[in-house]
Image (cartoon, grey):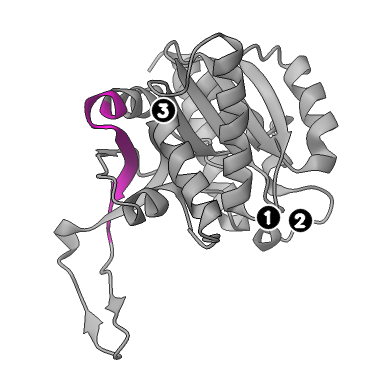
Amino acid sequence: MNIAVIFAGGSGSRMHTKSRPKQFLNLNGKPILLYTIELFEDHPEVDAVVCVCIESWIPYLLQTLQKYDIKKVVAVVAGGGTGQESIYKGLCAAEEYVRSKGVEAEKHVVLIHDGVRPLINEETISANISKVKECGSCITCVPAIETVIISQEDGALEIPRRSECKMARAPQSFFLHDILAVHRRSREEGRTDFIDSCSMMNYYGYSLGTVMGPMENIKITTPSDYYVMRAMIEVRENQQIFGI
């Protein structure tokens, strides 16, 4: 079973929106989050979707899922106090779902994705699933297009070759059993400062596979990101209209 856990629990303060969180901003009358959910809803290899949402916006999300006839969302859960805790709650909901089907979490693939990354494609999702089955994990990346500078504790600077650098994006995908195990270990150890799932898996000694995703796979964080997303979605819709 392949399950997407879509994280939409942030408030989006850098978007400077006053009326609603960024994941619920509308584009052509549809929330950004729905564009993301539909990518997994329409993918033939994705069996189920879990959404992690700001608690006060759960009723609105449930109404929206019904409005757009979304069938694969099997759970909507409230986010936690941190991104790490919110992802853990989503993973627990995924675990509960697979157990409700009478199976364990060990060999099921989970794709952890940001609700405000609506510009991935079917090929990226498929590549994630295949890579996890091949080596146990998959981090979607894009090439580093600018110089990366690493600042050392002693003040020295390390500048790796750009050709050797990749930028981690999403989905970040794992066997559900493995990512739950490291989350539970980090909770036992009081570690709540991991910036994302691949950082946590790397810290606890898991090897990480990678696939290259599309450059437009940006996270909608600032107003300029929103306008880039709007342009890209219009391009995709025009391609469908003209059969390109």
Q: Is residue 132 magenta?
A: yes
- The reply to whether dot 3 and dot 1 touch (C-beta < 8 Å) is no
Label 2: element kind:
loop
The spot of residue 223 in percent (x, y) is: 63, 56
Label 3: element kind:
loop
Label 1: element kind:
loop
Q: Amino acid at mark 3?
A: Asn
Using the image, determine if residue 41 lies above or below residue 160: above
Question: Looking at the image, can residue 125 be seen?
Answer: yes
Q: Earlier in the sequence, mark 3 or mark 1?
A: 1
Quarter of the view holding residue 61: top right
Q: Earlier in the sequence, mark 2 or mark 3?
A: 2
Name the one closer to the observer, 210 or 198: 198
Q: Label 2, on which residue?
A: 17
- Region in magenta: 131-145
Disc 1 residue crowd, few under 14, some 14–19, many 20+, Cα 10 Å: some
The spot of residue 227 in percent (x, y) is: 58, 48
Q: Amino acid at mark 1?
A: Gly
Kindly report the distance in space between the C-alpha atoms of the residues bearing marks 2 and 1: 8 Å
Kindly report the distance in space between the C-alpha atoms of the residues bearing marks 3 and 1: 24 Å
Q: Label 1, on which residue?
A: 12
Numbered label attached to residue 121: 3
Using the image, determine if residue 107 lies above or below residue 132: above
Q: Earlier in the sequence, mark 2 or mark 1?
A: 1
Left or right: 17 as drawn, with respect to 47: right
- Which residue is outermost to the front? 188
Quarter of the view holding residue 48: top right
Quarter of the view holding residue 156: bottom left
Left or right: 131 as drawn, with respect to 91: left
